[in-house]
Image (cartoon, helix red, strand yellow):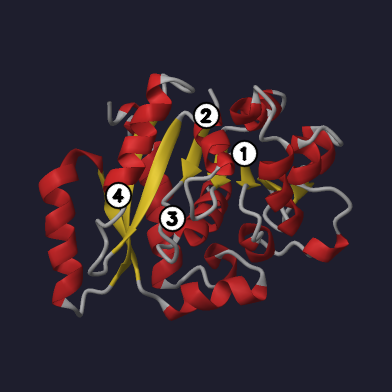
Amino acid sequence: MTQIICIANQKGGVGKTTTAVNLAAALAVRSKKTLLVDCDPQGNATTGIGIDKAGLSKTLYHCMIGEATPHEIIIDTAIKKLKIVPSRVELIGFEVEMMSDPSREHILKDLLDQVKELFEYVIIDCPPSLSLLTLNAMTAADSVLIPLQCEFYALEGLGQLLKTIKKIKQGLNPDLRIFGILLTMFDKRTNLSYQVTEEVEKYFKSLLFKTKIPRNVRLSEAPSFGKPIVVYDKSSAGAKSYMRLAGEMMNTGRTMAGN
């Protein structure tokens, strides 16, 4: 059965796109048929997986406004079992053009319903905002994975995100679950990382992944080469951590976490 997981946090700079790209790649390396959906107009996941955005004739935008089918815009990546639905800056126009459409929050779900059976995992990278695109992603998803950076204001904004998820459960997607909270940018040399971990464990222990994503130079370098970390440097701490995360996801029933 296909699992559709959106990576969401309205705060920027928390490792959201890094997690979407590298988790999708790690699942594919583990022989899982995986689709990465770039639902962010910045298109960073598209670039980070090695796709030349300028050379694309159609993207997620064209699909969401009815000018292309999902099958037409899914493209291969350098990793055998990983495909991507790419995005580009024109996706910004979706929010304006579809605002009066009564089914505007369900458009992505309707599109993914056409292709999801081809994959075991669908990973959706959301914009760093609680926008119509993010609502589409959460409506289409089975669960939400929340990256949380190990920094001073880590929990700021998390409450609002959880309220948004609760509202979506009450209306647009009653079956939506929180897959888990992933600590990112963990630096074992600082007390702050451990303090943030303790704080998150206090309130969200049952939702916290055992895997933590470390601060890692190679992980930061990989996007500029258009490669996920498992391709760029599979022996790095970043690559090993995302492989562990993929394994943790595959080996537990965490899609039923949350309420």
First of labels 4, 2 by sequence position:
2
Q: What residue sits right under mark 2 in the picture?
A: 139
Rate crowding at label 1 as few (under 14), some (14 to 19) or many (20 or more) other CA atoms within 10 Å: some
Q: Amino acid at mark 2?
A: Thr
Task: Say which residue appears at 85% left-offset and 38% top-offset.
Answer: 72
The earlier-in-sequence mark between 4 and 3 is 4
Q: What whole-number distance in Å separates the C-alpha atoms at marks 4 and 3?
A: 26 Å
**Mark number for residue 158?**
4
Mark 4, Cα crowd under 10 Å, few <14 / some 14-19 / many 20+, is some
> Mark 1 = which residue?
33
Residue type at mark 1: give it: Lys
User: Circle 2 sits in a helix, a strand or a loop, which is it?
Assistant: helix
Determine the CA span between mark 4 and mark 2: 19 Å
Looking at the image, which residue is at 52% across and 33% down? 4
| Mark 1 to mark 3 CA distance (whole Å) | 15 Å
User: Residue beneath label 3, please?
Assistant: 243
Image coordinates for residue 197, horizontal then vertical, percent: 18, 59
- Pointers 4 and 3 in contact (C-beta within 8 Å): no
Marks 1 & 4, CB-CB < 8 Å contact = no
Label 1 or label 3, whichever comes before in sequence order:
1
